[in-house]
Image (cartoon, rainbow, N blue to C red):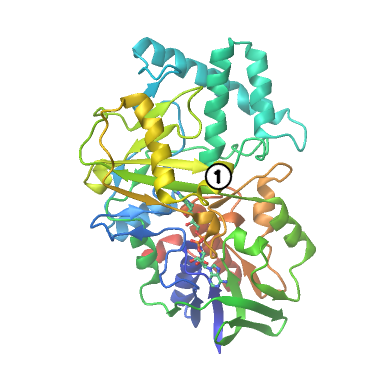
């Protein structure tokens, strides 16, 4: 008999498990995969780190991850482009004719991006319930009354922003869907791999791998959690499976989840966001730019290539697909995806560009233990809906995970804080987060 069963060994589950274990509770973590970390997943097979899931800490200031990664001795590298900013750090922008923007053109573009940004918050505030991010961007652009090309460029930029930030098309994201998208401080990535965080959190815990949970029975008397091969009884359970898995009803809750929780699960969106890493024999792009970005017409389907060479120690570009395009590439063979990315790059760098020597492509939407990449405020949903999913049920059943943390869903820090909240609710008292590093 355990005190608490934790379902899922991602950052949320391991955080809750670690805090409860430190408080003297008997805890077991059940994980479907053959590894811990969930959507933080470092592939080291090429001889360097390829983070197939999360890469960034989105802002070091006031972030619970900052102290923790330091305590775990994780090497970081500054890379402040992780939130689809127009400026802030050097970006090599290319115009509609695939020519690099000079200084004056860059300034003009940044001023345009800032002008839209300035008006967006007020436009979202004034939006009607059920309006989308695309609706408010269109309204702002109509007010600005720019030329067709300027408008199209700003339009495309904001479209790509929801694809990257939400894994969803702008028409599917609520008008308020990027309200919480603020970055405080520098962003960093991990040359040694993000998975060291989960490995550190899992140290000393009873984690059972390849245990796919199929049912959770709960009552005032406790819980029974069933996997393909075993069943575990406990006083309470924390379920941290991704929102995609909850939406697919892959776990049978008995009794069913209360209507308020089930409705919030249905309303919040699960986005799809995939990564394509391309390794080249040598650099053919300019030094000093954090990213290469195609603006306006020609920015579909690929638009931003991030120079992650310093992270992997080899010439490497990383690009993303989000929303419908991300779902489509999951059905395409690797060589077709690579050829399509190279087409976009050739329009900028010409035919002399070398062929890649390696590629790594993710397919999170078809991953049965994720069924998507991260959650977002879908049209008609609210940030509060995220937190409603975590409403304690019957005093014994707690849902946690990035999708349950309304302040900053879709992040590793959101996952961590949701695990912390679940542990505090179970113990009925505050627990200092720094105890995670002990
Ligand atoms: C491509 C990509 C890029 C990202 N980039 C960033 C980034 O740069 N910065 C950032 O902060 N965030 C990023 N994120 C989001 C971040 O990775 C997640 O928000 C966070 O890792 C989620 O943690 P979690 O514990 O909530 O869920 P998970 O890590 O998904 O953990 C849930 C666990 O439950 C397991 N599970 C599922 N079903 C079952 C079952 N039936 N039985 C048992 N176990 C089960 C899963 O295998 C998984 O290990 C990215 C995500 C993706 C996919």
Q: Circle 1: is it few (<14), some (14-19), or many (20+) Cα within 10 Å? A: many
The quadrant in which the C terminus is found is bottom left
**Residue 413 image position (x, y, % from top left):** 47, 53
**Residue 265 image position (x, y, % from top left):** 69, 57
Give the farthest residue toward the bottom: 1
Instruction: Say if disc 1 is inside 8 Å of ligand 1.
Output: yes
> Relative to 170, is 415 above or below?
below
Q: Tell which of 67 and 331 is nearer to you.
A: 331
Which residue corresponds to the image point at 69% horizontal and 45% vertical from the top-left?
382
Q: What residue does disc 1 label?
A: 167
Q: Tell which of 414 and 289 is nearer to you.
A: 289
Q: Tell which of 14 and 331 is nearer to you.
A: 331
Which residue corresponds to the image point at 59% horizontal and 55% vertical from the top-left?
403
The quadrant in which the N terminus is found is bottom right
Determine the secondary structure under disc 1.
Answer: loop
Q: In this rendering, would 252 be left or right of 97?
A: right
Which residue corresponds to the image point at 46% horizontal and 63% vertical from the top-left?
38
């Amino acid at each position: 008999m355990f005190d608490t069963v934790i379902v899922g060994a991602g950052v949320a589950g391991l955080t809750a498990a670690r805090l409860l274990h430190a408080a003297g509770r008997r805890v077991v973590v059940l994980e479907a995969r053959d590894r811990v970390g969930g959507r933080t997943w470092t592939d080291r097979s090429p001889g360097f780190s390829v983070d197939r899931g999360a890469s960034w800490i989105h802002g070091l200031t006031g972030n619970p991850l900052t102290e923790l990664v330091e305590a775990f001795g994780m090497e970081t590298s500054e890379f402040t482009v992780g939130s689809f900013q127009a400026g802030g750090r050097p970006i090599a922008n290319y115009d509609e004719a695939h020519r690099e923007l000079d200084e004056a053109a860059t300034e003009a573009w940044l001023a345009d991006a800032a002008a839209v940004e300035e008006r967006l918050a007020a436009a979202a505030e004034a939006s009607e319930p059920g309006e989308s991010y695309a609706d408010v961007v269109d309204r702002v652009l109509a007010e600005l009354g720019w030329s067709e090309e300027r408008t199209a460029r700003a339009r495309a930029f904001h479209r790509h922003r929801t694809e990257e930030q939400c894994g969803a098309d702008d028409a599917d994201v609520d008008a308020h869907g990027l309200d919480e998208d603020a970055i405080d401080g520098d962003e960093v990535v991990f040359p040694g791999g993000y998975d060291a965080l989960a490995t550190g959190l899992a140290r000393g815990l009873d984690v059972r791998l390849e245990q796919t949970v199929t049912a959770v029975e709960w009552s005032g008397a406790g819980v029974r959690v069933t996997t393909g091969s075993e069943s575990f009884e406990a006083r309470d359970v924390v379920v941290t499976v991704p929102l995609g898995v909850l939406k697919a009803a892959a776990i049978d809750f008995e009794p069913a989840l209360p209507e308020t929780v089930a409705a919030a699960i249905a309303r919040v969106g699960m986005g799809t966001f995939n990564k394509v890493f391309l390794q080249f024999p040598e650099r053919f792009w300019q030094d000093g730019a954090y990213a290469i970005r195609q603006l306006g017409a020609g920015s579909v389907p690929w638009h931003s290539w991030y120079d992650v060479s310093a992270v992997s120690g080899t010439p490497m570009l990383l690009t993303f697909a989000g929303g419908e395009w991300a779902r489509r590439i999951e059905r395409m063979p690797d060589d077709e995806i690579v050829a399509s990315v190279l087409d976009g790059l050739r329009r900028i760098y010409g035919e002399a560009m070398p062929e890649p020597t390696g590629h790594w492509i993710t397919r999170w939407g078809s991953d049965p233990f994720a069924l998507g990449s991260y959650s977002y405020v879908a049209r008609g949903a609210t940030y509060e809906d995220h937190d409603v999913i975590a409403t304690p049920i019957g005093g014994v059943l707690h849902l946690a995970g990035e999708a349950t943390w309304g302040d900053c869903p879709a992040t590793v820090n959101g996952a961590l804080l949701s695990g912390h909240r679940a542990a505090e609710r179970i113990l009925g008292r505050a627990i200092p987060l720094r105890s995670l590093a002990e």
